[in-house]
Structures are given as C-alpha cells and as structure tokens.
Image (cartoon, helix red, strand yellow):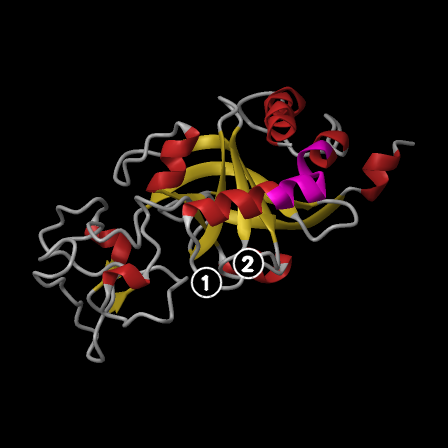
Amino acid sequence: MNSCSSTRRKLMNFVRWNRDRQEADEVPIWQLPDSNVFFFISGMTIDADGAPNAYHPDDTGLDELANAGSPTHWDGIVTDRHNKPLIQLESDPFPGYYISCTSLVDQTKEFSDPSRYVNSTKIPYLALPAEIAERGGAQLGDFAFVVNLRSGKSSFAIYADIGTLGEGSVALAEALGISPNARHGGEADGVLYMLFPGSGNRKPRTIREIQSQGERLLSDSGGIEKILSFSDASGGPAVSSGDFSGALTFVLKISRSID
C-alpha cells in the first residue's frame, strides 16, 4: 500500500458554477500532510478591485462595471451611507473614477482614500471564496504561492479579496505570464494556488514583504516537494490540460532555485 495515498488529505470539494449557473464542476481542495497548508488547481479570472482605475461611471475602467455589483448592492466600489458610489476627486490618482475596494484594507487610512485598498495593478494578490477560507483557516493578509503550470512561471502573493475560486490581481497575472486584461484575459485552467493559513497579520504588505515572507514559508514547509510526493495518477490532484506530475517538475525546480 502506498503510504502517501493513505495520508494525503482532501480538505473539501468546492462546487464551482459557471457565470450562467447552468453547469457546475467540483474542484478538490487538498491539504498537505501534517500541515495546515492547502492548495488547489483552477483557472484564473482577473480581479481589478483595488486599482484606482478599475471602474468608471461610463464603464471605461479596467473592468466591466457590472463586476463591481449593481446600484442596489455594490461589491467592488466604496459607497456612502446611502449606497451612493464615491467618485475620486482631483487630488486622487484617477479623478472621475469610482473608488474601488478590496476586502483587505489599510485601517490607518480613511475609507475614501483610494490607497486604503490593495491595488490590483501593483500588488500580486488572490481572492478566495469565504467558504474555502473558513474551512482552510485562511485569513485576509495571509501569504500564498501561485504557479502557472503551463509555463512554470510563479509568484508569491497575498490573500486580499473575498471572491470566486481562481481569481488573481492584474499584477499576479502579469507575473505568471497570463493575460492581465480584466475584461477579456485570464486562463481557463492549469494554475496552482498554495495558501499558508495564519501567516499574515491582516494588513496589506509591500511587494518586498510578500516576496521575503513567501520565500521563507515555502522553504520552511517543503510544500512543493510534499505535493509532488503525495500526488499520483490514481488519486492525486489533476490538471485537466495535462499531466500533474510532469507539470509539477517545473515547480519543483522553481522551489529549489528559491532555496
């Protein structure tokens, strides 16, 4: 009996619906043995939230205005007490654009300050469904390691927004060699997301902090080697577009070069 197969743990199966809610598939969320680190493979849609030029009243921003919600319930836009969207002033980065927000914020800044939120075009971040974050023990501000399994390109990131499965910021997509266009970009599958629950301080971080903390966490956990060791064709995670073990060979080389 393969001891790896007996100790490998599936945290949960997450049901993912398409935009029309007509079809659904199940994405397995895996947890490393003897660790709270969890990972999954999905595609990537582009999350522009937090970028000061994300949304415009005339729908000319980085992303479609419809993705920020609706007049009865805005999600990606800061509103006043009457649910009226706030528009940036002349002193702000993009006057006339809405102030776009992320779930992770800098509490030291006013809610009407665009820099209070994590800028999608500057910071590599990912979004998670609340259900997965809760089950896995992840909190906003925790660190992550994300890999494009097609190319082997990787990036450290921060968990900065609550959203759908497989969402990444413009900056994260650029680092992975994925089209960063929030309206038409992204990747259908083949992106590995590894989360380190409890690793953050619930505050936004600089790129330098994300890189240094991510390197330490990846090195300490031995994460990629464990995934490679505890995955097999009979029951481990799979990439719909190719062989999982072969793709992870790229990742293993990356992690060793980081060490």
Q: Residue 203 has which mark?
A: 1
Decide if residue 148 is on the left or right side of residue 66: right
Q: Residue 200 has which mark?
A: 2
Q: Is residue 5 magenta?
A: no
Please provide the residue range marked out in magenta: 216-225
User: At 35% from the left edge and 71% from the top edge, which residue is drawn?
Assistant: 108
- Image location of residue 229, percent across then percent down: 76, 31
Q: Quadrant of the N terminus?
A: top right
Chief secondary structure of the magenta portion: helix
Q: Quadrant of the C terminus?
A: top right
Along the viewing direction, whichever of 184 and 144 lies nearer the viewer: 144
Dot 1 falls on a residue whose secondary structure is loop
Decide if residue 186 is on the left or right side of residue 126: left
User: At 62% from the left edge and 61% from the top edge, which residue is drawn?
Assistant: 137
Which quadrant of the figure has residue 224? top right
Along the viewing direction, whichever of 258 and 191 lies nearer the viewer: 258
Amino acid type, mark 1: Lys
Dot 2 falls on a residue whose secondary structure is loop
* Image height of 81 relative to 241, above or below: below
User: At 19% from the left edge and 79% from the top edge, which residue is drawn?
Assistant: 82
Residue 75 seen:
no
- Image location of residue 53, percent across then percent down: 19, 50
Tags 2 and 1 in contact by the CB under 8 Å rule?
Answer: yes
Residue 211 seen:
yes
User: At 35% from the left edge and 55% from the top edge, which residue is drawn?
Assistant: 118
